[in-house]
Amino acid sequence: MRRSSAQGVLYGQTVANVAGIANSDLECMDILYLEGRVTAGRLAEVTGLTTGAITGVVDRLETAGLVRRERDDADRRKVFIAVVPEAIAKISQFYVPMQQAMEKVFGGYSDQELHLLLRFANEGYKGVVAATEALKGLLDTPPEKRPALKLKTRPRRP
């Protein structure tokens, strides 16, 4: 799982390099795509970045033509960040090799096995979200009062 996660990060970095943007900007764009149109404050909340850092991210993505700022029709003071639909096609093409590779892998599994893997992936995602929130909780705890976190060791397999 760690190797797969690390390789996913490396693949994302490669996509960002090919697209000509920073990896953190690509990740923010992906979150925008998944979340839909959101405010800069919400994007900051989801990413853990400061609102100042998000302003820089949005400025860069907007300059690259990947996102746009949209005023709220009901409250003109409110601004949403939205992915430019054509930008999805531009960025998505770089994921074709990944999609092809994964389709080849998935082709070797039965429907029952795929359902199990999907359940594992969904439950794993929920576990990572919970772990992230727990770790964020340590931010408000002075270092000397933080609980000791220790990994359970397991014998390594050859």
Image (cartoon, helix red, strand yellow):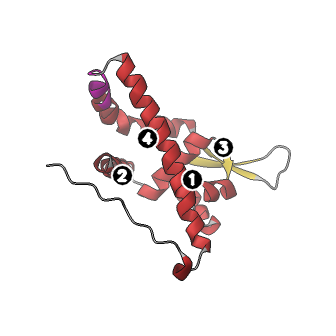
State the residue at coordinates (67%, 54%).
42
Q: Is residue 133 visible?
A: yes
Which residue is painted at 62% across and 68% down in the image?
A: 52
Amino acid type shown at disc 1? Glu
Query: Is the Cβ of the residue at disc 4 closer than 8 Å to that at disc 3?
Result: no
Q: Is residue 49 visible?
A: no
Closer to us: mark 4 or mark 1? 4
* Mark whose residue sits in front, 3 or 2: 2
Task: Kindly report which numbered mark, 1 or 2, lies closer to the viewer in this rendering.
Answer: 2
Q: State the image coordinates of residue 124 (x, y, percent, origin top left).
A: 45, 42
The single residue placed furthest to the top in the displayed view is 111
Q: Amino acid at mark 3?
A: Arg
Residue type at tag 4: Ile
Image height of 126 relative to 41, above or below = above
Mark 1: few, some, or many residues within 10 Å (few <14, many ≥20)? some
Is 59 placed above or below 95 here? below
Disc number for residue 37: 3
Q: CA distance from mark 4 to mark 3?
A: 18 Å
Nearest to N terminus: mark 4 or mark 2: 2
Which of these two is toward me, 26 or 59? 26
Using the numbered discs, state the Cα–Cα distance from disc 4 to disc 1 in whole angstroms. Answer: 14 Å
Disc assigned to residue 91: 4
Q: Is residue 137 magenta?
A: no
Q: Which residues are magenta?
A: 102-108
Mark 3 element type: loop
